[in-house]
Image (spheres, rainbow, N blue to C red):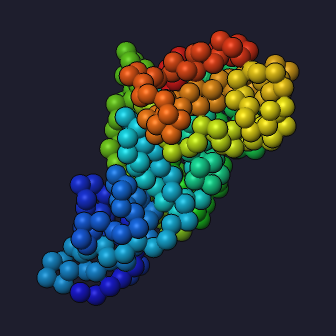
């Protein structure tokens, strides 16, 4: 067998499509089923991983992954039940969070979760509002402006009319970008708009359920015609579970909170739920921290505190059903968060 290096494009059922540096495409299993330094992960390799493969001389088009090169970063999530970590993309230069104003509706809580995951990966975030042709209300524009004020990038675009597509193309030029977002927001459509002829499959949005139909079924990296720009299309997710972050340290993943929390009167022991001397709660009251972002923080924190991992560390019994409960309790104590359409979905 001859060894060659390559780029993982996609993987399913432990078979990975690898684009080798010599131009060949090989379908590869992992030698020995698991690669040493990534054992324990649900899916062992992600789109964007650099690997070493050995082509199988007796089996054209097939090979074995023998080693994984060190990852610069990983954009990952936890599966629906929050049990296993799934690496979706590796070595990304930009996380593109795609959303839409309608069909499906804009869900800032989902964007906030993606922002936390981008912070965890140490990758910059671009918040895209696609389907701008359907009209964008002031409340949504306002929320996009909040992301910009926080230092993220945000822009409107439309795969349908082409608005913003050139600008998006410039954003992703020469790097590896992962496109994430709920089903039906137009991730695959945008990639087709960026590069006509790409032929990504596009689905419908159910009017009745206001949701996409999960057309893209696995994360897949495509090298664009320039040979330098790589895009990773991903399947739409309904809800992003967050795990593996210490609840007490969650403020570090919210740029506007990270700078305030060291100033709280009770320092590290402040739970930021409105106790006296809490600078974060005061900033929400004053309006310098957006109430809706704070609400996202409280909800994610409650979710992290309800995990078995955290409760066993704190010596608390496991909770039978915990989702959202703590957050509701917390928000009653804290200032009332702004309501937003789609707010209750916690998506
Ligand atoms: N009006 C309008 N419709 C759009 C736009 N972009 C995409 N769509 C439509 O939205 C629907 C869903 O598009 P997809 O590209 O399949 O969405 P997706 O995000 O890839 O969905 P999943 O693969 O299921 O995660 C299709 O019917 C598209 O034609 C847009 O800018 N404007
Ligand atoms: Mg798609």
Furthest residue in direction front, as rendered: 315
User: As drawn, is 225 to the left or to the right of 40?
Assistant: right
Instruction: Write down the quadrant of residue 305 in the picture.
Output: top right
Residue 307, image x, y percentages: 46, 34
Q: Quadrant of residue 151?
A: top right
Residue placed farthest to the bottom in the image? 2
Q: Position of residue 222 (x, y in %)?
A: 43, 59
On the question of residue 194 being in view, the answer is yes
Above or below 244: residue 197: below
Q: Would you place residue 133 above or below residue 38 in this image?
A: above
Question: Which residue is located at x 44 percent, y 70 percent?
Answer: 50
- The reply to whether residue 9 is in sight is no
Q: Position of residue 250 (x, y in %)?
A: 64, 39
Please tell me which residue is depicted at 53% across the width and 35% down the height of the picture: 314
Q: Residue at x 58, y 42 (%)?
A: 246
Q: Residue 45 at what x, y percent from top left?
A: 37, 61
Whether residue 255 is situated above or below residue 3 in the rendered picture: above
Q: Is residue 2 left or right of residue 256?
A: left
Q: Tag count in the figure?
A: 0
Q: Quadrant of the N terminus?
A: bottom left
Question: Which of 14 and 301 lies nearest the eye of the viewer?
Answer: 301
């Amino acid at each position: 067998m001859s060894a060659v290096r390559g780029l993982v494009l996609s993987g399913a059922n432990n078979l990975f499509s690898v684009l080798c540096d010599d131009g060949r495409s090989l379908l590869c299993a992992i030698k020995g089923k698991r690669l040493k330094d990534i054992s324990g992960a649900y899916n062992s390799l992600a789109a964007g991983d650099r690997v070493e493969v050995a082509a199988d001389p007796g089996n054209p088009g097939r090979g074995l992954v023998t080693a994984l090169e060190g990852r610069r970063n990983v954009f990952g999530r936890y599966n629906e039940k929050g049990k296993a970590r799934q690496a979706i993309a590796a070595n990304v230069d930009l996380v593109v969070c795609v959303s839409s104003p309608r069909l499906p509706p804009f869900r800032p809580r989902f964007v906030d979760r993606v922002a936390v995951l981008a912070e965890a990966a140490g990758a910059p975030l671009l918040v895209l509002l696609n389907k701008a042709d359907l009209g964008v209300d002031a409340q949504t524009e306002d929320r996009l402006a909040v992301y910009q004020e926080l230092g993220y990038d945000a822009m409107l675009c439309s795969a349908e009319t082409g608005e913003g597509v050139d600008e998006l193309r410039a954003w992703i030029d020469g790097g590896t970008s992962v496109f994430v977002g709920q089903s039906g927001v137009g991730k695959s459509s945008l990639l087709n708009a960026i590069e006509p002829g790409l032929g990504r499959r596009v689905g419908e949005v159910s009017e009745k359920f206001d949701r996409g139909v999960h057309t893209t079924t696995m994360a897949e990296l495509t090298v664009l015609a320039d040979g330098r720009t790589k895009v990773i299309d991903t399947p739409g997710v309904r809800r992003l579970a967050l795990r593996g972050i210490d609840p007490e340290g969650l403020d570090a993943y919210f740029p506007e909170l990270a700078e305030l929390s060291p100033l709280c009167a009770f320092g590290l022991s402040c739970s930021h739920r409105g106790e006296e001397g809490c600078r974060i709660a005061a900033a929400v009251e004053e309006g310098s921290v957006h109430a809706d972002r704070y609400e996202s923080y409280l909800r994610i924190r409650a979710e992290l505190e309800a995990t078995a991992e955290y409760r066993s560390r704190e010596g608390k019994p496991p909770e039978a059903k915990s989702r959202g409960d703590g957050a509701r309790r917390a928000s009653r104590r804290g200032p009332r968060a702004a309501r937003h359409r789609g707010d209750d979905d916690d998506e």
